[in-house]
Structures are given as C-alpha cells and as structure tokens.
Amino acid sequence: MTTDAVAPSVKAITCPSCGGTLELRASGFSTLIVCLYCGSELDLTNPQVKLVAEHAQAGAELVLPIGSRGHLKGADWTVIGYLERMDGWSRWGEFLLFNPYEGYRWLIHQAAGWSFGVPFLIQPGSPRGLTQKIGNEHFKKCFRETINTVDYVLGEFYWQVRKGEQAEVNGYVSGNRMLSCEIVGDGYEWTMEEWVSSSEVAAAFGIEDTGQYPETGTHPLPHQPNPSSGLAGFMFTVGAAALIFALVFAVVFGSASPRSEASLLAGDTAQSRQVVIEPFTITGSSQPFTIDTRGEPGDNSWLDVEYVLTNMDTGESRVANQPIEYYYGRDWKEDDRRGTIKLSSVPPGRYSLEAEVVRPEDERGTSASFGSKAKPVEIVAGPGGIFWSNLVLLFFVLFAPAFWVLAKSMSFEAVRRDDYDYGNDDED
Amino acid sequence: MKRRLFLVYAATSLVAFGAAAMTGYSPFGDGKQERDAYSRGGGPSHK
C-alpha cells in the first residue's frame, strides 16, 4: 500500500487491494473510502491508509457517478460517496455530497423520487416519539420503525460505514419536509429531508432525468408536494371571482327595458282571448325578449297562452307558448299559474306580440265554451332579461376543471396515505 | 404554466359569457319557442 500524502491532507491514494488510484475529495474529513474499482474498504483515520476489508464487488453504474459536481440548493456539491440501503420492502440509494464550506449533505434517491437531506444536529425530541416539533412546525410519524441494512458502499464517508450495517429508522413528515432519525446502538442521527424534483437534480448534476412518482413509483414520497393542491385552490378562487364578475355583468346588461302590459279576460268570445301588444323596439345588438305570464285557469285546470313575436319590418316571427296550470289534491298542490318565456337573440327592429289564450273548453269545441267562466290572464313583455342558464353553464365551464384537479389532488393524497402505516385511517 | 393556462381559459369563458349576455344569446333558449311544445292540459305530474 502506498499513499501520495499522509492523511488527512492526502489527495490521492492507491488501493492496496487492486492498485487503482483513488481521489480523495473530502480529504481531512472522510474516515473511510470504498474503492471505486474493487469495493475494498480503506480506513483513512490512520496516516498509513489501511485496508479494512477486501471485497471484489464491481463498481455500480451510478445515476450520479462519484466525483460528479453540481449546484443544488444554493451551493456547489461533489458526490463523494454512495451507499444503498434496503429494508423489507424497498431498496434505495443515498449519495453523500460534500462542500468544504457547507459540509455534508445527502441526496437520497428512491423509486418515487429524490430528497435533499441536511444532517440535523439538534435532537428535536424522543427518537421514537409519535410526533416531533421544530419551532412551530409539527412533524407527524408516518411509518412504523423499520430496520434497514447497508447493502452497498462506494466512495468516501465521514464514518466507518460497513456493508451489513443496520439502523432503526423513524420518519416524520410535515408538508414537503421529512425528518428522519436513524438509531444505531445508543446513537441517533437526525436528517431533515426536503423533496427535490428529479428534473432539478438532473439539471444540477447534468444527468438524465430519472423521473419521479407517478412515472417511477406506485406511491409518492411522504413529503412529495401534491402537484394539484395549490392549483385546485387557485382554480376555485379564479372561478369564483369570474363567476361574481359575470353575475354583475349579466345584471347590468340584462336589466330589462320598459315593458308593456296587457290583460285578457279569456272568456267565451274570441276577442277576449286575443291581444296584440306593440310596438317593441330593439336597438343596437340582439337582445333577449322576456314574456311574463300570470293567469287563473281555475281549479284543477289549465290555460295555454300562445305567443307570436313578429318583426313589423321584415315579417319574420318567433312563436312560443306558455302553459298556465293549477292542480291540487287533498295533500298536494301543483301551482304553475306564473311562467316566464325568454326568447334569445332577438335582432334589432320593431316588433309586435300577439297572444292567444286557449282553454280546455275551447279544445272541446265552440259550443262547449259558451257560458264558461272567464279566466283572466296578465301579460308583461319587453326586450331585455337575464339568461340564468348561461350563468349555470359558466359555473360548470369554470368549475369542472377545478373539481377535476381537486379529485386528482385527493387521489394523490389517498395514494400517499395508503402507503402510510401510521396516521392512516385504514391502520389496523 | 397550468395556472396561466387556466387564467386564459377562464378569461375566454368570461368573454364568451359576456358576448352572450350582450346579445341576449342562450344555447338553451330558456324559453318554449315552439308552438305546441307543450301538450295542452297535460295534467298534474302528481301520482
């Protein structure tokens, strides 16, 4: 075994096992390096770099190769170490980053995405508690304790990590931050993990985007931000503001012009059942035309008022009819003695409105109608009016996407919580 | 990006609504525009 310099100032060493040249990137800080070529563990605490364990493991093809440099979270980092851990359910990689001014950080790569871990020197609370509090931030336990095992090691580390090393891990989550605690013997190591997007990691280190949930995992990370929650709130806010604006707009533009009134007795003579109201003038753009009808059809009877709106200049006409009905029984009543018709987009011009009332007895024949009781009908008509259906349609147009995003957001949370075994309603 | 897209979508919907309100247009008509659209004396719906 040879060294180019005495630790801790050593910059490059030769692996005593395979002869490979290893570059020390955190010289003076690291206590262990695992050979990139043969996997042998070398102790750096001794001036004479010593072979700790000889392995013949092949160097992994890492997503972030040892020695990669990148700018992430406001600082430049060099990847100096990599280890893989596994528990009973999954396997993940942890990259040790180093900056001489900032110290060590972790970049944790799980199937569902990446986290940026900052070693937390203050012990927030009991390492096996159900919650942790840091300042005003409450962290809630989301997983039961798991035992994970180091299964692969490569590069430099600040402690004597060994393949097979086991730690008990507890995880606590608050928003997009996760506090994890590794317990080895009597020692605790707290790490504050912040979710970081795979694209951000890719951009920082110039690697290919490895993807994240939902592309790469079945569950999001406990601290992965819900991509839809903020968007849903924004959409509901914008939708509500737009709807209020539309309501005011509709009321202002839909306010009716002065309207004309007419009354009919609707008796036996044809004259008493017919009326022509004119003229109505529509200027500018097209407008709705509103006809309010109120009548007294009598008990358990009906009237039908038939309307013809005719353009007095062109002769074009629009027809409509309004049933007026009143039925009742011992314990029920159907009162439709009022009705409103709104004709849409009536072009500018002068109009006349003809109204004719049809009674049940009129349908049965002229002779049957003699002597029947008059059934008064009142008509109020004129240009203008509000189409509330447009407002309802606007509501659906604005809020349908918002509800869809909300559903996506809730689905994200449901899948996330499905992976929790603490704080989950389905917990057994 | 999605927020901006929704803002454009909402603005377009509002413009369409405003145009409909100013011209008195409704896709549903809100009225019974056909003669005999109702059968006269259809009777109560109460069973």
Image: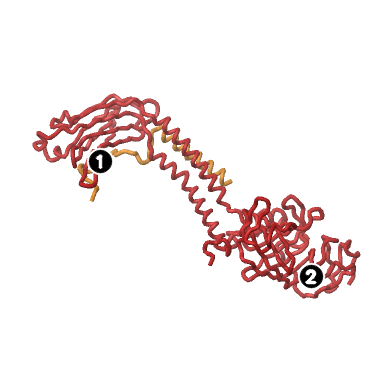
Q: Where residue A92 sits in the image (x, y, percent)?
A: 67, 65
Query: In the rendered image, which quarter is residue A50 located in?
Result: bottom right
- Graded by Cα atoms within 10 Å as few (under 14), some (14 to 19) or many (20 or more), the crowding at tag 1 reads few
- The label on residue A37 is 2
Query: In the rendered image, which quarter is residue A57 located in?
Result: bottom right
In the displayed structure image, the side of residue A235 where residue A188 appears, left or right:
right
Task: Read off the chain for label 1.
Answer: A
In this rendering, is residue A181 above or below A374? below
Label whose residue precedes the other's in the sequence (2 or 1): 2
Q: Where residue A187 sits in the image (x, y, percent)?
A: 74, 66
Which chain, by letter, is orange?
B
Is disc 2 placed on a helix, strand or loop? loop
Residue A198 visible? The answer is no
Instruction: Please state, as top left, top right, bottom left or bottom right, where the N terminus of chain A lies in the image.
Output: bottom right
**Residue displayed at 56% across by 45% down:** B3
> Residue tagged by mark 1?
A335
